[in-house]
């Protein structure tokens, strides 16, 4: 089968023929990949800044955002049947299971010995076929076929939003999203759906396609300093943006960091203490977050979601992964 792989020996990105996977256990599901999304993590992987191939191999099939259609199921599979649409979860629990993985919160693994499909120690979904355990697949209603590939990035947002709501007292009313990429736009839509006054703040021109899309959703967009907010979500991957976000926290404010790495700068711990502010990190998503993503995706306005996605062919992977970031929030490869 065709697959897009990273070669950790040659340190290059290739299209290769790889062995087709097959069902080996009664709990497994074989599915055809219909679409694979590309994000900043894939670009970081392609620059060999993170990730690793499966043990004993030098190749890693990329892709952790995917929509598939079931071809066949093992005898013990009970909730999924041939023809169903599915989205795979990304992380696989450590073994033996830690306290978090044992309660099905692999996103909170405390050992670091997890595997992540298409990222760490396990092949991903930028290929024609894949096999997963039934428990690792999220069924998708046929009505969401056009947007199902957004479930995985939205699940990351759902986890962050849930965390922010739990940490904020007595309950948030406003939010600032840092970044106008796919995660930023999905975060803005999720918080708008929950009744918050949301502003998206980024450096892109207010005349840019992404800014126009955000405005079409009825969400203010600004390159200037926004007003302080109860929730700040960093969705840029920029350490300087994360430091900037601290200045946007209102009293009792909660900032959730999703992508920023190491930063050097000034942090006023006095403000955090005096104003009862919280900074939290969040990575990956729980099964519950995936379920929320499916539910919310069906409630978002279809024209906005449609405007987020640019679909390209399988062979355009070098441009989407190695080229400059696309003006569309989400590039999706049709397989």
Image: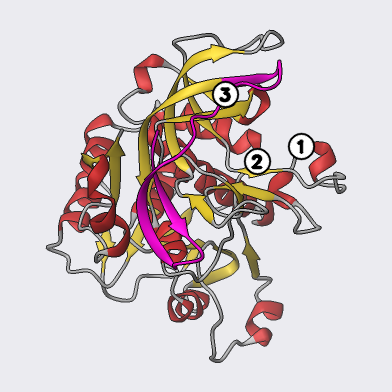
| Camera-side residue of 158 and 55 | 55
The image position of residue 175, as x and y in percent, is 45, 58
User: Closer to the N terminus: mark 2 or mark 1?
Assistant: 1
In the rendered view, tell whether residue 178 sits above or below residue 53: below
Give the residue number, with chain letter if any, for mark 2.
286
Residue 5: in magenta span = yes
- The answer to whether residue 333 is above or below residue 256 is above
The part of the chain drawn in magenta is 1-29
Q: Residue at x 59, y 50 (%)?
A: 284
Confirm whether the magenta stretch covers residue 277.
no
Q: Reading the chain from its start, which is encountered first: label 1 or label 3?
A: 3
Would you name the residue on which mark 1 appears?
A: 104
Q: Which one is in front, 200 or 317?
A: 317
Q: Nearer the viewer, residue 273 or 83?
A: 83
How many residues crowd mark 2 within 10 Å: few (<14), some (14–19), many (20+)? many
The label nearer to you, 1 versus 3, is 3
Mark 1 neighbour class, 10 Å CA radius: few under 14, some 14 to 19, many 20 or more: some
Could you tell whether 222 is left or right of 175 in the image?
left
Across and down, in percent, residue 61 comes to 48, 47
Taking the spot 48% from the left edge, 69% from the top edge, the residue there is 48
Q: Are marks 2 and 1 in contact (CB under 8 Å)?
A: yes
What is the CA distance from the residue labelled 2 to the residue labelled 1? Answer: 8 Å
Q: Which type of secondary structure does the marked residue at label 3 adopt?
A: loop
Q: Is residue 244 above or below residue 259?
A: below
Q: Give residue 53's quadrant in the image.
A: bottom right
Regarding residue 309, the answer to whether it shows in the image is no
Q: CA distance from mark 1 to mark 3?
A: 25 Å
Residue 22 - label: 3
Q: Give the mark, 3 or 2, whose residue is nearer the N terminus.
A: 3
Q: Which mark is residue 232?
A: none
């Amino acid at each position: 089968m065709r697959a897009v792989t990273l070669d950790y020996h040659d340190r290059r990105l290739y299209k290769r023929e790889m062995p087709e996977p097959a069902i080996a256990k009664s709990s497994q599901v074989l599915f055809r990949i219909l679409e694979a999304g590309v994000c900043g993590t894939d670009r970081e992987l392609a620059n060999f800044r993170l990730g690793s191939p499966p043990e004993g191999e030098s190749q890693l099939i990329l892709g952790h955002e995917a929509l598939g259609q079931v071809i066949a199921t093992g005898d013990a599979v009970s909730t999924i049947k041939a023809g169903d649409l599915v989205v795979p979860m990304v992380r696989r629990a450590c073994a033996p299971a830690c306290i978090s993985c044992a309660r099905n919160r692999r996103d909170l693994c405390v050992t670091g010995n997890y595997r992540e499909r298409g990222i760490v120690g396990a092949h991903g979904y930028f290929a024609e076929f894949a096999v997963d355990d039934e428990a690792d697949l999220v069924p998708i209603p046929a009505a969401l076929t056009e947007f199902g590939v957004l479930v995985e990035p939205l699940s990351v947002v759902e986890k962050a939003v849930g965390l922010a709501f739990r940490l904020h007292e007595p309950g948030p009313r406003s939010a600032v999203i840092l970044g106008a990429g796919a995660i930023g736009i999905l975060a803005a839509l999720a918080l708008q759906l929950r009744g918050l006054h949301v502003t998206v703040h980024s450096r892109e021109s207010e005349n840019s396609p992404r800014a126009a899309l955000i405005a079409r959703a009825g969400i203010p967009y600004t390159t200037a300093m926004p007003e302080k907010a109860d929730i700040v979500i960093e969705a840029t991957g920029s350490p300087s943006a994360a430091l900037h976000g601290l200045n946007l926290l209102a009293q009792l404010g909660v900032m959730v960091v999703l992508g920023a790495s190491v930063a050097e700068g000034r942090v006023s711990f006095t403000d955090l203490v005096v104003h009862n502010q919280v900074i939290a990190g969040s990575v990956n998503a729980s099964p519950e977050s995936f379920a929320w993503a499916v539910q919310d995706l069906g409630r978002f306005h279809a024209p906005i979601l449609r405007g987020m996605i640019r679909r390209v062919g399988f062979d355009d992977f070098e441009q989407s992964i190695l080229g400059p970031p696309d003006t569309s929030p989400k590039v999706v490869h049709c397989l």
